[in-house]
Image (tube, rainbow, N blue to C red):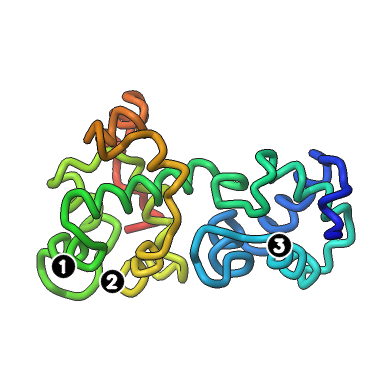
Amino acid sequence: PAEWLVADPDPRARDEVKRVLLNRFGTMTHAWRLHLDSDESNHVVWQEFKAGLLKLEYTGNLAGAWRALDKEENGFIQLRHLDPESDMALGYFKLWCEKKFGTIVQAFNVLDGDKSGDLTYREFRQAIYRFDFSGHVRTLFKAIDIDDSKVISVGELMFLEDWSTSHLEHADLFELMNLEALIVPAAVKEKAREALDDPALV
């Protein structure tokens, strides 16, 4: 059987894995998208997780770390297990785009008002607020801008077409048609609306 099936959860090993990923990639989202989740589906199975950490020469208790991450014993993990805030930002944005515009591509075409083919942080923030988006924009922008170019293109958004949001959809999001109230706490919404432009993103 796979090692994780007979392992006990090891929170210490889980935290070691997180440190290894952060030290190598800078952010958990970069580690997830560039290294662990090769098909950008927001699903990583044990074999992918193990291979990814072995490439980074991690020699700790991988099976125990996996069990500590996959508490539900689904047989896979998602970004939410490593970086809940970024996972929520990406998932909410995908659902918002599909509800508001139909598809990710159509959403980008509308948001890209000057038809330049890319959006700076300031353009992105202004555009999505114009259409009543209420999530945490800095977190979202950094999660999308995987090459750290400080601009995002439609190509950088395409991974969201296949990005799993099943853990969010189970919350009756579409039936209630109230994504903001369910996903983004009022305090976070207010903070996002009042936040000044981040100089690192402009």
Q: Say which mark, if any, is on residue 109.
A: 1
Residue 106 higher or lower than 193, as above or below: below
Q: Earlier in the sequence, mark 3 or mark 1?
A: 3
Distance from disc 3 to disc 1, alpha carbons, whole Å, reads 35 Å
**Mark 3 nearby-residue class (10 Å; few <14, some 14–19, many ≥20):** some
Q: Earlier in the sequence, mark 2 or mark 1?
A: 1
- Secondary structure at badge 2 equals helix
**Mark 1 nearby-residue class (10 Å; few <14, some 14–19, many ≥20):** some
Amino acid at the residue labelled 2 = Val
**Mark 2 nearby-residue class (10 Å; few <14, some 14–19, many ≥20):** some
Badge 2 vs badge 1, beta-carbon distance below 8 Å: yes
Amino acid at the residue labelled 1 = Asn
Q: Which residue in the protein does label 2 denote? A: 154
Residue sitting nearer the eye, 103 or 57: 103
Distance from disc 2 to disc 1, alpha carbons, whole Å, reads 8 Å
In the rendered structure, the answer to whether residue 77 lies left or right of residue 19 reads left
Residue 193 higher or lower than 14, as above or below: above
Q: Say which mark, if any, is on residue 48.
A: none
Residue at figure coordinates x 83%, y 60% from the top left: 2
Q: Position of residue 26 (x, y in %)?
A: 61, 58
Q: Which residue in the protein does label 3 denote? A: 49
Amino acid at the residue labelled 3 = Phe
Q: Quadrant of residue 153?
A: bottom left
